[in-house]
Image: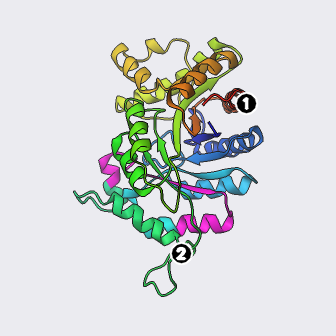
Amino acid sequence: MQSFSLLDLSPIPEGGSAADAFANTVRLARAAESAGYARYWLAEHHNMPGIASAATALVIGHVAAATKTIRVGAGGIMLPNHAPLVIAEQFGTLATLYPDRIDLGLGRAPGTDMATARALRRHMAPEDSFPQDVQELIAYLGDMPETAPVRAIPGAGTHVPVWILGSSLYGAQLAAYFGLPYAFASHFAPAMLGEALETYRATFRPSTHLAKPFVMMAAGVCAAETDAEAAFLRTSQLLAFARLRMGRPGKLPRPVADVAAEVPAPMLRQVEQAMSCSATGSAATIQRQLASLLEDYRPDELIITGMIHDPEARIRSFEIAAEVLRGLQAGAIG
């Protein structure tokens, strides 16, 4: 593991507002910068009462303005929702304002339900244009000649690093074919993690962007001073995910003493499985769990995430995780 990073969905907590979520995100980003995280990524979701990062490029700019050195980016932008030129202009603008600090991760899913996808008014064409859209976007960010009929201004010549995100073999194959870094969404869809990383590494083609494969894997982390406290704090995310799957999305719930009393057993098992690529507990406990994940999958970078209702506890969780990950780096695990 060469580095570790942080993924934030800018959660809106029960009893709070989107303004609170943005304030909490800035505080967390500053803490992450101080703790040694390499990147701070935000994700595009729409029509989610508990997630404030829908206008992802705007939130990235807000975070970049509030920090000094940490890389800030999208994990990711759901490209089917957007014209490639618009994203090139947005991220070209960010890269011009914050040179050498902006990343662009691209996903193929809409990041929402179909009714909201229609409301976004991109297009609902049956064919998959994602590979072509990725190529078009990269071209806009590259050294496009001044005589080109369409250019991204700002954008052209910024060479914003582009990542392919995925939770299946599709993204792995595409990232390998284009010679781009690959990030796997194992924090909520771990089933194909091993196969996808193997496929990406085995079929990678060197490119002008990247000489050899570079893998980022995601893991959920909820850390506290004790195992019991961490397990209690994590119930907020378990509840939020379960309610989403049951068609009742809402703000990030307060933690509960007995999550099994709140969620039917079959659904809770599904949620636990979906979130099984994770570490929960004290520093000593998450050290063992994260070391095992790093040993099994050997990522070049680990990006961690975790939605905790109390913003102070969330900051502390990521501070504990950073201490553990620095120790794992020093021990050459991963």
Instruction: Say if 239 sits above or below 204 in the image.
Output: above
Locate the N terminus and report the quarter of the image it occupies. Answer: top right
Name the residue rendered at 37%, 32% in the picture.
192
Q: Which mark is residue 330?
A: 1
Q: Quadrant of residue 150?
A: bottom left
Identify which residue is drawn at 42% across, 30% down.
190
Q: Quadrant of residue 20?
A: top right
Q: Quadrant of the C terminus?
A: top right
Between 156 and 267, the residue placed more toward the observer is 156
The residue sitting at 59% across, 33% down in the picture is 15
Rendered image: mark on residue 84: none
Q: Report the span colored magenta.
A: 89-117
How far across and down, in percent of the image, does residue 179 sit? 46, 55
Q: Which residue is mark 2?
A: 143
Question: Residue 83 vs residue 311: left or right?
Answer: left
Q: Residue 93 lies in magenta, yes or no?
A: yes
- Name the residue type under label 1: Ala
79 part of magenta stretch: no
Q: Is residue 191 visible?
A: yes
How far across and down, in percent of the image, does residue 305 sit?
A: 57, 34
Q: Residue furthest bottom?
A: 147
